[in-house]
Image: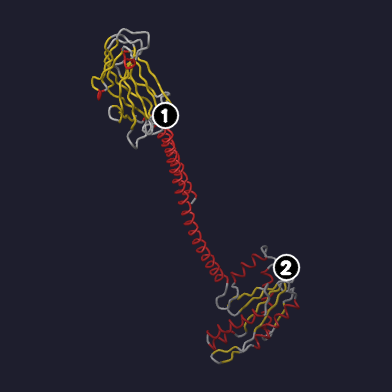
Amino acid sequence: MQKTSKSSLILLYRALFLSTVLALVAILTYFALPDRKVRILPGFGHESHLFFDGEKGGLTTANWVNQPAFHFTCTATTPVTETPYCGLSINFHKFENGIDYSNFQHIELKIRYHGNNHRLRLKLHNFKPAHTNGDTQETLQGLEVSILASDANKLLVIDNRGWGNFSQGSTVDIGIDLVPPIAPGTHELQLEYVEIHGKRFKAESWYLGVALLWLLSNLFFITRHLMQQEKRIRNDSQRLSTLALYSNDLQQESQHYKLLSNTDPLTGALNRNGFATDMGQRSPAGKMESNTTLMIIDIDHFKRINDSYGHDAGDVVLRETAKIIHNNTRAADRFVRWGGEEFVLYCENTNPQQALLIAEKIRLSIESANILYNSAAIPMTVSVGIGVALASEDFDHLFKRTDQALYKAKNMGRNCIVLSDTNDK
């Protein structure tokens, strides 16, 4: 059980470690995710127009070469004192539904320019129409980038630093113009395309998703482990209950066999083995305490009973005799079937006078008992030998003295009691 629990715990630790490693890998994977590219020009809804100072009396004019392709020219005469201007403005007022453009990181533009002006300028403005006041729009964020005309035909990459976010509900302006002073002559410009680049997911959304997956997976592993542990504990508890019942049955069976091994099955009295076990616990050194009485009770003419009435009758006599003796003993006394028709009664704290009274009571009870077998009364008497132990006398010596007293009772005509003399050897 302990080994299985330890193995299950190791598997849990491995699962938690693996989920943590995968979470770290997922976090780092964010930086390796390919950028999402969205071409907003051409393609998205927009309004485009040319602006030039000639509209207000200046000397610079602008004309479309191909408006859908954002291809136009600016023509400038000799500069005057007022600042000239000429360029293209594109207003994006509608973005594709269901797409979040707020996470872009940079913008890519491709411009074609032919002319002799020194520099060009890109203007990026982000407006919030909800904040308009009359005919005036409030510019929330903006960015202006000046580039050399010689670099205009290259791919331009502009980081999103301070420009703001593309988002639904906002208006974005992209403008291209000539940086004053504008060189005299014709300047040809074309905005080929505009792309925004950014991560497919916001970093905080990605990290939150990874954290939630990590927590949920760990919660799953821990819950699964706890459920397995609960199931294992329940199974172990049932197994222990079964083993406990089995152990109890074995213990009861062991006690039963122990009782059988220590008890005479016919009379229910102790047998010699049971008495020896009891004596080993009472007197480990084999020495008797003073006033310990031993009685040997022998059924008179038992062979004659067997011969006259049969062995079944003899068994009845043995059982009835044992019952009478047992009824006249105390709880602390030990009653033993020594063998055949011979019984032993072991009594502690019993002096000779008390022993004689007990033996006489037993003798009279047996003599007066009405034992019937097949409706025939079986007369029965017993002879009793009594021995009272001296201090530190061993059991074998006490038994020998008691047996000699029984022998005397037999010689005296039976159905009597003889107390052993302490001088008997």
Q: Secondary structure at mark 2?
A: loop
Q: Which percent across, then down, holds residue 192?
A: 27, 22
Disc 1 versus disc 2: nearer the observer: 1
Numbered mark located on residue 357 in the image: none
Q: Nearer the viewer, residue 173 or 366?
A: 173
Amino acid at circle 2: Glu
Residue 29 visible in image: no
N-term-proximal mark, 1 vs 2: 1
Q: Which percent across, then down, holds residue 335?
A: 64, 75
What colour scheme governs how the chains and residues are painted in the rendered image of this protein?
Answer: secondary structure
Q: Is residue 395 left or right of residue 127?
A: right
Q: Nearer the viewer, residue 372 or 57?
A: 57
Q: Relative to 316, is 138 above or below?
A: above
Alpha-carbon neighbours of circle 1 within 10 Å: few (<14), some, or many (≥20)?
A: few
Q: How many marks?
A: 2
Quarter of the picture holding the C terminus: bottom right
Residue under pointer 2: 289
In space, the residues marked 1 and 2 are separated at their CA atoms by 126 Å
Amino acid at circle 1: Gly
Numbered mark located on residue 134 in the image: 1
Q: Is residue 320 left or right of residue 53?
A: right
Find the residue positioned furthest to the left: 66
Residue lying at 33% horizontally and 22% vertically, measured from the top left: 89
Q: Which percent across, then down, holds residue 33?
A: 36, 31
Dividing the picture into quadrants, the one containing residue 380 is: bottom right
Q: Which percent across, then down, holds residue 125?
A: 39, 24
